[in-house]
Image: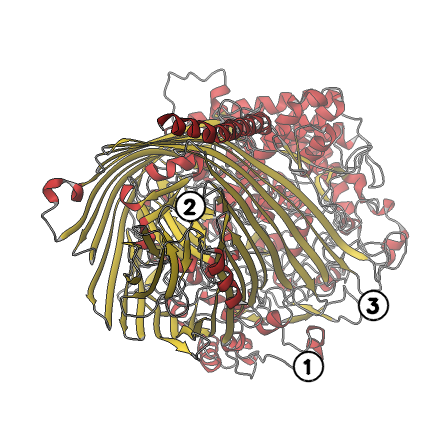
Amino acid sequence: MRKLLFILCAILSVSANAQLAVRGTVVDQTGEPVIGATVLVEGTTNGTVTDFDGNFELNTEAGATIVVSYVGYKPQTLKAAATMNVMLAEDSEMLEDVVVIGYGAAKKNDLTGSVTAFKPDDKNHGQVTSAQDMIQGKIAGVNVNTSSGEPGGGAQIRIRGGASLNASNDPLIVIDGMPMDASGTSGTNNPLSLVNPNDIESFTVLKDASATAIYGSRGSNGVIIITTKKGSKNQAPKVSYNGSFSVSTISKKLDVMSADEYRDYIKTTYGENSAAYRGLGDASTDWQKEIYRAGLSHDHNVSVAGGVSNEVVSMPYRVSLGYTDQQGILKGSDYRRATGGFSFSPSFLNEHLTFNINAKYAWSHTNGGGQGAIDAAFSMDPTRPVKSDDPAFENWGGYWQWVQPTTVYDPTFPYERNGEGTSNPVELIAHNPYDKSAHVLIGNIEIDYKIHGLEDLRLHANIAGDYNMGGDYTHKSPYSSYGYYYGGDGESKTKQYSLLATAYAQYYKDFNDNHHFDIMAGYEYSKTHWEGNSWSKDYYPKSNLGTDDEGNPLAGTVHNESTYHWRGQTILVSWFGRANYTLMNRYMLTATVRADGSSRFAKGHRWGVFPSAAFAWRITDEPWMQNVKEISDLKLRLGWGQTGQQDTGKEYYTPIYQTTTQLDRLYPIGPGNDGTLYRPMVYNEDLTWETTSTWNLGIDFGMFQQRLTLNIDMYKRNTTNLLCTPTIPAGMNYDNAMLLNAGELENMGIEVALVGRPVQTKDWYLELGINGAYNHNVVKELYGGRDMIEAGMTVGMQKNVTYHKVGQPANSFWVYQQVYDENGRPVQGLYVDRNGDIDDNDRYFYKSIAATWTGGGYFKLSYKNWDLGMNLRFSVGNYVYNNIVQSRMNSATLYNPSKGTYSNNMKEVIALGWTSYEYPLTDYLVQNASFLKCDNITLGYNFDKLFKNDKYHGIDGRIYLACSNVFTITKYKGIDPEQPGGMEGSIYPRSRTYMIGLNLNF
Amino acid sequence: MKNIVSQKSKVESRKPLSLLSFSVTVFILLAAGGLNSCMYDLDNGNIDPNVTTTANPTALYSKCYACLILEGMDGASDFKTDDAGKSTFLRNLFNANELSTDEAICWWTDGGLGDYGINRPTPSSDAIRYLYYRMIINVSYCNHYLELPEAQDDKTKLAEVRLIRAYLYYQLLDLFGNPPFITAISNEMPRQAHTFNSKYDANKSYSRAELMALGREYLFGWIESELKTAEADLMEAEPRTDTDVNYGRVDKAAAWLLLSRLYLNAGTYLNDDGQNNPYWREALDYAEQVINSPYRLFDESLQDSESKMWDFTPYDMLFCGNNGSNGASVEAVFPLLQDGKVTRAWGGTMFFIAAMWNSDMLTAYGMYAGTSSIGWAGMRARPQLAEKFTTTPANFVGKSAEDNRLMLEVNAATRDDRAIFWGEGHTLSCIPNDGQGFFHGLAVPKWSNQYTTDATPHDAGEVDTDFFLLRAAEAYLNAAEAALHQGDAAKAKTYVDAVRKRAHAAVRDSYTLDDVLDERSREFYFECLRRPDLIRNNKFGGLNVSYGWEGKGGNESYTGAPFDKYLNVYPIPSTEMMANTNLIQNDGYTEIEK
């Protein structure tokens, strides 16, 4: 079939008016034949592709120019000759050559804004389940932190730290022209996880406002444009396989007491004759060991890419299928995903009319594993067995539990769980009743038409849609902690669709060699609609003896049920335009403007206009620089722009009432009243966008033919009308907090990216890269003349611990200064007194959750067929509130005499000897969480021409070994310093993963 | 040759030109068409089916009642909290008015409960914050209803909501002295009560104590007038059972009882001295209006035979699962509804059972709590509460509640149905309050979800027990106290005797003011009345107050230690002080440095 297609292509490409028969071979720098390279007579559709040995034949007129090109190589343009031996050089800048930007593409050389294009590294990587794994640590100023180690889990992505206080700081993610809704859908953790990373061709990260302002009201937090892979013109079908197999293990457990240590502790604390000591169990269980495992995962991807073409139509295509099955390290947790996608890019009318049709589908299924089990394993008494024959535990399937006798159920349920004791973690896993799954379909049709006779004018339309459907499912057994006695089933399903219609026209004009001009104007409509419903129901078991008020038996009837239905939509209508002017190919000016109308705001506050302007100067192209051979690139960029943020979740401006939906929390009072309640909701008619103005100054610098490159960007960013939900005065409106435009925030920073390729020989290749970003933010002003507002993190019993205060970084901790004893232990309740007694005025501002320095580094080394790579990532100056310790701070309650239960604790906390939870606002718990992480080390071996014979060119490919999450260097005392929210609770721990992978190209 | 070329190019260019114009036309049409429909789309508004822009006066009226006992909508809090159950009005009222007194203590170390227990309330206390926000948000719901055009036709309901709002302001006056005062919904920053007092001059400077006095005086007058205005339109006083559709609605008796309570405490609010009160007469008159109404004490004569067979006393039946239907509601001037099927709440009567029970306890009539939700085990009695029933409270230790009742019943002089103490496994002393649990101090299984018939509660976990926010018994003891101040000891004796007889307690020849205060403790302990009762009798804050209790002022001795009088009023929460720049912190408390 493959061969047949190839022959077909060859025949189609034979031209009738041949005058010269050209024969040739195309090889790469190492002398290897290039298969499937395009050989084209310039200015015609007359062309062919090279065969398996790099050979081609072509008939053309004498004196014609022949262009030979192949993806990843610099194209060669040559005069036609009877025999042509062409060597293609690899083009390290190939990807960067043309960069996808908002509503168009631009030559990298012509960019005026801070734009980083990034192609996933297919060699130097660890376990990649989601697109977010590919950009982690790679781009200066782009910070990716996974939220936990849960399979299929989400991540927090921040570009330059985000511009908002409490509104979303998530960047806008655009997949093939379709902006993705960040809120996602139930049934999945993260919209990004539903794009198969193997299908991603490139990322473009727009960082500064001059680049993102074209996205207007959604551009404030930066934009990540993902472009998926496409086939190439005139390419023989190419079948590839990527697969991997991996084992994940727990990287760090919590240091709680072992059974023996626990017995000793109880004996020492309460005495050998105490009820506490006598009540201990005689088992020795390491509960953390019981719930974790080595998780096995495998991942397979197959793709076919190619292109057919003739005089009428050219049709590149790519079809891919993928399957991932990932086991979590928590028993019972797993993630499975199947993806399929295709892309066709037919072009007609001599490339005047181009279509680009993409569709991607993904199905995923996530089983969280009893996640309460992680917390329970920290706290469960280690002297209890996992299972027991005692009849008291019969109703939990024999799993040991804290139980107490009960008479309220029925004779077959003589015991209930003692709610104050920890649930058996293993039982929580065994009876885990939750799973979720989702289907996502994303598709778009792009039409691009170059007007015949007026080729300078291009019309472009994109119709895109995204449909997803997901659900969370619950099946609780009556014989489990989750659904004891009544059991219960439930579902929560959502459906969401987004529609996008974009149309723009672009006009290019070169007045002469010195003046290039292009202008683009367009219109966009986008709508997101979501709806969902959930229900839950549980039942009286058949053995129940109760009766209702009328004396009817309750056995088998519904005990509780509830249903809930929701629906919402947001609409955005936009006009936008861009103008570029280039003078003498080295002075470049860009201006953009976008006007957005959003359904989230009231009339009069609905439309926002977002302008930008940028200037770039390509210094290397100055005549006086031509003699400086060492410097291969030097460009200065200056930009300014305004962007917005409109993520309020929903309309917030209308006075509305919330209505009761549950039938068990009604208040029927007076005649004709079913008890439905209405609650007036807080609203803000004056709500409007947050606006961010950014100045950016950038320098791109390259030396020694780009073997050393340096990019520096400096920025200052002011956000006004910050969307925030601070506490408002009681009695105002209808709540104690309200979403409002609450102030002004300033961010300043610098980003540096340095890449060096010191060794580049036939056998050896070494590349080193390092990037770092410094960001400083400070709250400039708050609404209503206020000095500080709560930032949202609460600890203990809803005590606010982070605040936004004028003059301080956002999300700063406002805490008491802990006093320590001579052994360096924090003394319970003893704070540094600043004013004669301990009150709010003794609190002080101490650090913030945001890192001041973030970045990453890597090296890639290859020798002949071998390659070795490593990625590092660092974060400096981020502080984390250690809530794992706080939630166990009272270590005096390990034995609870009033409930007869025991719990375990961390040795570190026991050593502190605190007896209260009342002091969560101590700065002892605000801990330096700076870290250096090694995300992966990868060793690969490349092979080619496997099984080569006369008829078959053989298989090439690569086999590699990788370790992910290799090590972490930190002073932080909790489990993992990487906490995007600035607080560490009991999360699913990130695993260490060992992987073997295989890539094959047939 | 030239011509030919130009002709050729003309011919070739015709087709592309038409294509161009066609494309441009389509493009413009698409854009324009899209534009039209899209601009309209921006007005579509909220399509969430769980919200509506149309007011439903009945549902908004119900909300004004519900927010006294439910946490919010569908089990979620009405305002931002960490735990919906902690946002409920009743639970917060219990914490503020019981944990700070000689009646109750809680060992839970979270959220300011400990601060209440040692009389060191601070502006940053979580518990005080919840109490404050709960009451003010409830006021907002009432304000909204009272302004609602659709609600104006039903004068009775308006009067009821007006009474609920006055009750909330009464509690704000009692607990916070000089809170912000809001009677209409607005986005203006609320002002404190003192600014509404006609005596207040914004240009003069006042001490914080003076501002407190101005604020209290204003609120006192406003509440008095509101209750009187509401009274006119309220339903006639008429006790009901829960099968009556109007059960749960307030009638004139509620206005009378609240007026009586307001006047009884007028000394506290007007003179910062509970005994210096010009309103004893009014306190007596309004209490007697309740006493002479169809509401009455639920006593043995009203008890059915089935409940007697199960050894329920009339007092027990006020706090049982079926108290809305077993006859006890003859005393319920303002019952708050609870039902295991229809009206569930985390912080209503559920709290009064769950927080006070442990799984091995039984009631004084020998039964389980009647609900599986009993695991919280937090609140216990201080020994001074047990002392109100016996001179030898240590005898309660080691005995079940049933045995303790039997022990007292042996002697007619000591018998009192209201002594409901569980002592098995417990000590009398409630100290140390060290987080070691529930067993320091006697437990109080006063509320239960048991039915006094052989019917079963509506749910094994959720409770059916209504909460009697206002009981007719209060009118009797208000009247007795006011009568003593009026010099009418005989009248006082009649009313105290009535309350004691209902509890099968022996009557005495005469009663002093201290006797009446103790009687109030016996009758109403754990019912959220204790703090104002002690303040009125000058037995709460004040460094010269001799009355003490174990743990008072954070002193672990049996009679504790006195604390400053400014602590009679709670501080305005610091979150509120930061949010509302109009406010001035209550006298004595640290102002946050802004």
Q: Is residue B367 left or right of residue A843?
A: right
Q: Chain of mark 1?
A: A
Q: CA distance from mark 3 to mark 2?
A: 55 Å
Q: Position of residue A250 (x, y in %)?
A: 44, 73
Residue that mark 3 sits on: A543
Residue flagged by tag 2: what amino acid is it?
Pro
Comparing marks 3 and 2, which lies closer to the viewer?
A: 2
Image disc number at residue A390:
1
Q: Residue type at mark 3?
A: Ser
Looking at the rendered structure, the kind of residue marked 1 is: Asp
The dot on residue A171 is: 2
In the image, taking residue A415 as reference, residue A783 lies left or right, namely: left
Q: Position of residue B151 (x, y in %)?
A: 71, 23
Q: Which is nearer the N-term, disc 2 or disc 1? A: 2
Q: Is residue A268 above or below residue A646?
A: below
Disc 1, disc 3: CB below 8 Å? no
